[in-house]
């Protein structure tokens, strides 16, 4: 086996304890907290150990540059990497797997004596999950110009900390202008590769998806003295809305989830006066997504009329469908599968319902592709997320094989 195996296992052992909850086994690596800052330091150390040039843009995105002597600096660079942050109580693999694999892939390329004709960059994009400031893929959106700093700098987290107080923000050097293509390796967030009995897959595209905030306003009151018929209880409106989301998604074969709720005054013996809830919705087309969210909102308003409450719906972020660059995807499949028809591996090409930085870059005009590594549990955004070490090492090899072809 090449040195990529031991190197990856060592790096993965270094990452494993950072931000891990002793109670749940899940990870709390929210952006610009102690755990994520430790990971950023780890990224800088990996870059320094390999003689890579480290940059950080005003939005917190880290980039490590490999510029071999044979590389033509005038040619667009190949970008790889992923992110280091996690959702609340998340899994170990979502994000860091792609970053660690990228560093190991550079080691393998050097070990193989690959003569890179163009530069290579490894990125760790900031706030990919949107777990702290509520905007998924925020770092890549800002770097790509898909979001404006003036529109997001006043975002606050759950404790009232302002994004603009953590980052310098724009104007920024448009470093993505020097990128020719982007390849992101990621743990699969589902079980399709298990069904295909394949350790590695390639992404075809990303479903359209978004986040909507439902503000449900009622009247706070006493839980004991207030008759049921005299109440204006927004919790009832929310409960019906959550059930409506489940029903509409099941009927349409799509996805709708209320996963975060805030209640005020949040007392056991009080009728709530306000409920704020966030809907995550995803569908296989933009029309299906719009129709599903509209149906959920219609049912919420109908229920609010009966409960004597009010509903306000705000779209906080909506991402269109993304089709990854087809010529690049075909080339990735060919490079991973191998050229010899007798020994070529079968590489499934899969759609994904999860958002990724690769989708933001593709939408910004940078040809992008994704490699998936098999997840036998099918679980993601939770502690049970998993990828066997043998499959992780297969992912490192596949990434190195692909980068070798793209760099030459």
Image: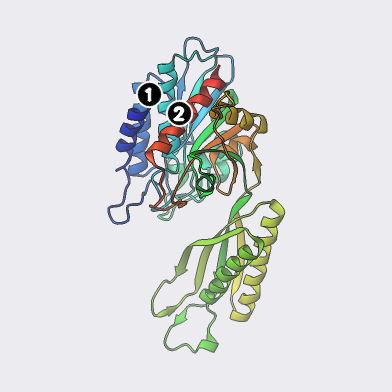
Above or below for 126 versus 265? above
Spatial CA distance of label 1 from label 2 is 9 Å
Q: Residue at x 43, y 16 (%)?
A: 112
Drawn side of residue 47 relative to residue 207, left or right: left
Above or below for 213 versus 189? below
Q: Position of residue 312 (x, y in %)?
A: 61, 65
Q: Position of residue 268 (x, y in %)?
A: 38, 77
The residue closer to the viewer here, 36 or 230, is 36
Q: Position of residue 4 (x, y in %)?
A: 38, 26
The residue closer to the viewer here, 56 or 377, is 377
In the picture, the disc for residue 48 is none
Q: Residue at x 27, y 53 (%)?
A: 22
Quadrant of image for the C terminus:
top right
Above or below for 140 versus 134? above
Q: Residue furthest top?
A: 70
Above or below for 187 versus 51? below
Q: Residue furthest right?
A: 287
Say whether marks 1 and 2 touch (CB < 8 Å): yes
Structural crowding at the residue carrying mark 2, measured as other residues with C-alpha within 10 Å and reported as few (<14), some (14–19) or many (≥20): many
Q: Which residue is mark 2?
A: 397
The residue closer to the viewer here, 251 or 142, is 251
User: Image quarter for residue 315?
Assistant: bottom right
Q: Residue at x 67, y 66 (%)?
A: 295
Q: Secondary structure at mark 2?
A: helix
User: Image quarter for residue 11?
Assistant: top left
Residue 129 appears anywhere in the view: yes
Q: Which residue is mark 1?
A: 2
Q: Position of residue 351 (x, y in %)?
A: 61, 45
Residue 174 appears anywhere in the view: no
Q: Residue furthest left?
A: 22
Question: Mark 1 or mark 2, which has the lower sequence index?
Answer: 1
Q: Secondary structure at mark 1?
A: loop
């Amino acid at each position: 086996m090449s040195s990529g195996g031991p190197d990856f296992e060592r790096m993965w052992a270094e990452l494993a304890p950072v931000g891990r909850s002793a109670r749940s086994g899940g990870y709390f690596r929210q952006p610009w907290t102690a755990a994520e800052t430790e990971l950023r330091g780890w990224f800088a150390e990996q870059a320094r150990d390999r003689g890579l040039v480290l940059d950080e843009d005003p939005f917190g995105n880290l980039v490590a540059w490999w510029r071999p002597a044979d590389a033509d600096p005038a040619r667009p660079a190949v970008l790889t990497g992923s992110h280091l942050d996690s959702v609340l109580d998340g899994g170990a693999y979502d994000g860091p797997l792609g970053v660690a694999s990228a560093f190991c892939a550079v080691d393998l390329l050097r070990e193989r004596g690959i003569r890179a004709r163009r530069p290579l960059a490894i990125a760790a994009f900031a706030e990919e999950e949107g777990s702290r400031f509520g905007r998924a893929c925020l770092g890549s959106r800002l770097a790509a110009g898909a979001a404006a700093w003036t529109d997001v700098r006043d975002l606050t987290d759950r404790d009232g900390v302002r994004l603009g107080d953590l980052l310098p923000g724009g104007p920024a050097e448009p470093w993505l202008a020097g990128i020719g293509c982007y390849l992101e390796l990621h743990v699969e967030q589902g079980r399709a590769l298990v069904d295909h009995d394949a350790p590695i897959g390639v992404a075809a595209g990303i479903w359209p998806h978004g986040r909507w905030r439902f503000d449900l306003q009622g009247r706070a009151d006493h839980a004991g003295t207030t008759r049921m018929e005299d109440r204006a209880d927004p919790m009832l409106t929310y409960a019906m809305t959550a059930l409506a989301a489940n029903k509409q998604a099941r009927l349409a074969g799509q996805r709708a989830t209320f996963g975060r709720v805030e209640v005020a005054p949040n007392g056991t013996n009080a009728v709530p006066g306000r409920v704020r809830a966030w809907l995550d919705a995803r569908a296989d087309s933009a029309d299906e997504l719009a129709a599903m969210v509209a149906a959920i909102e219609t049912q919420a308003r109908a229920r609010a009329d009966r409960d004597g409450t009010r509903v306000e719906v705000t779209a906080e972020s909506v991402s269109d469908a993304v089709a990854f660059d087809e010529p690049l995807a075909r080339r990735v499949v060919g490079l991973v599968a191998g050229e010899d028809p007798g020994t070529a591996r079968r590489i499934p090409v899969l759609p994904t319902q999860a958002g990724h930085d690769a989708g933001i870059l593709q939408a910004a005009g940078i040809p992008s592709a994704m490699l998936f590594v098999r997840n036998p549990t099918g679980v993601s955004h939770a502690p049970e997320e998993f990828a066997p070490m043998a499959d992780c090492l297969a992912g490192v090899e596949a990434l190195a094989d692909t980068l070798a072809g793209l760099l030459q």
